[in-house]
Amino acid sequence: MPLPAAFEERIRQLHPAHADKILAAFAQPRVTSFRVNTLKATAEEVREALRSAGYSLEQVAWWANAFFVTDLSVQQIFHPFYEEGKFYVQGLSSMLPPLILAPQPGESIVDVTAAPGSKTTQMAALMNNEGHILANDLSPIRLFKLQANLNQQGVTNAQVRRGPGELLWRKFPEQFDRALVDVPCSMEGRISLADPESYQDWSLKKIKELGMRQRMLLRSAISATKPGGVIVYSTCTLAPEENEAVVQWALDKEHGKVVLEEIELPGLRETGGELITPGLAEWQGKPFSSDMAKTLRIYPSARMEGFFVAKLRKLEATVTPEALHTPPARRTGRRSRPRFRR
């Protein structure tokens, strides 16, 4: 089953110089990667155990606790350490948002759409289980998986909450030091030609629908964050309508009270031929802020899935008493249910 023609054309518009390379990556198998859970083990302990079991590993240049398996045929790591929660199989790109958010021990963090918990557990390890994480999600089924992962990874500083992330700010106005908004998206960065189901539901209509929800999730995270705090917005899609356009909308709505910051992660661009670029300056004739160059676009490759990450700093309060006392707008009509990523 070939890629949709409209999708392929959009890739050529996104990055004309490397479009063929990006499109070819959708046919490549991706290496298995994992991160060490430092709540239960050290990187050296896990590395030696897996090497002794016959796995060929390479450490990731930009994080000492991340590794990938150099044998492309390995899709899953079978080892007792996995069941014990000493390491967690996770895509390299997916590890970036918590590292960029950089939660500190003792801080208060909100994970707006947390399930199934890969980033929540990573943040808990970065915080050494000190401080507090509010892990929010809407789906009861997905919350069971989230809680199971927290238990397996030995996380004790996270509280699971069920509720719409779009309204979370009303319950917790400007209460958190940092917020992670890893939103449901169209999953373009995870498309694989070997798995037609990964793209059979792709459409421009769904991208538009998702973009509307993503705006509300990001603005809710901004409103739940204290002045001076940090918000990281991320997706695993390439669609500008879900990436730069969402961030631009939030910047415009907050009128200078929120700004983009540079993303600093030494070694990220030296990972081995990956195509990592700044965010777009414009899309289909609509310009973005020049600060959008501070965001990251990661195009799919054999080692990394496609991703987008933006780091924002909240400079001053954005929540007014009037806003808190205004009832949320009622949803009318029947809304379609696009295929969300997590």
Image (cartoon, rainbow, N blue to C red):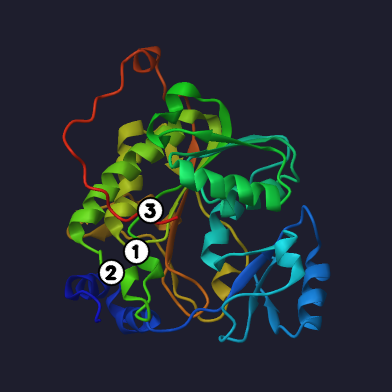
Image side of residue 95 versus residue 219, left or right: right
Image side of residue 16 versus residue 28, left or right: left
Image side of residue 315 versus residue 152, left or right: left
Disc 2 crowd rating (10 Å Cα; few below 14, some 14-19, many 20+) is some
Which of the numbered marks, if any, corresponds to residue 292? 3
Mark 2 near mark 1, Cβ–Cβ under 8 Å?
A: yes
Residue at disc 3, secondary structure: helix
Q: Is residue 106 above or below residue 155?
A: above
Give the amino acid at mark 1.
Answer: Leu
Query: Which one is earlier in the sequence, the residue at label 3 or at label 1?
Result: 1
Residue 185 coordinates in the image, percent (x, y): 35, 54
Query: Depth-wise, is mark 2 or mark 1 nearer the camera?
Result: 1
Which of the numbered marks, if any, corresponds to residue 14? 2
Residue at disc 1, secondary structure: loop
Quadrant in the rendering for residue 108 = top right
Which of the numbered marks, if any, corresponds to residue 238? 1
Mark 3 near mark 2, Cβ–Cβ under 8 Å?
A: no
Residue 215 appears in the figure: yes
